[in-house]
Amino acid sequence: MDEQLFTVRGMTCGGCLASVERAVKSAAPGASVHIDMDNGVVRVSPPGDLAAIKDAVQSAGFDVE
């Protein structure tokens, strides 16, 4: 299955993880989101609109690479 990987900085707790997941799902409804908070890696499948996902996560207060 195709997926997108993002590095997200600033996640420090479960609340941060939930905020990032909500942000991604708002930009990519129906996507599966897997977050490795320790390494700052977010996997989104199937891939969505890259710019929209990054904007949503940044709007939630996190840095995205």
Image (tube, rainbow, N blue to C red):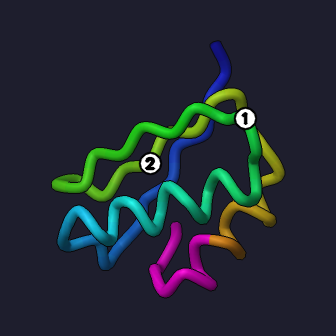
> Left or right: 41 with respect to 14?
right
> Left or right: 8 with respect to 24?
left
On the image, numbered disc 1 is attached to which residue?
Answer: 30
- Residue segment shown in magenta: 57-65
Give the secondary structure at mark 1: loop
Q: Crowdedness of circle 1 by 10 Å Cα count: few (<14), some, many (20+)? A: few
Position in image of residue 48 (x %, y %): 78, 43
Q: Are marks 1 and 2 in contact (CB under 8 Å)?
A: no
User: Residue visible at 65% across and 51% down?
Assistant: 25
On the image, numbered disc 2 is attached to which residue?
Answer: 42
Q: How many marks?
A: 2
Give the secondary structure at mark 2: strand
Position in image of residue 1 (x %, y %): 64, 12
Q: Is residue 39 above or below residue 58?
A: above
Sequence-wise, the earlier of marks 1 and 2 is 1
Q: Crowdedness of circle 2 by 10 Å Cα count: few (<14), some, many (20+)? A: many
Position in image of residue 2 (x %, y %): 67, 21
Q: Is residue 28 above or below residue 34?
A: below
Q: Is 8 part of what is drawn in magenta?
A: no
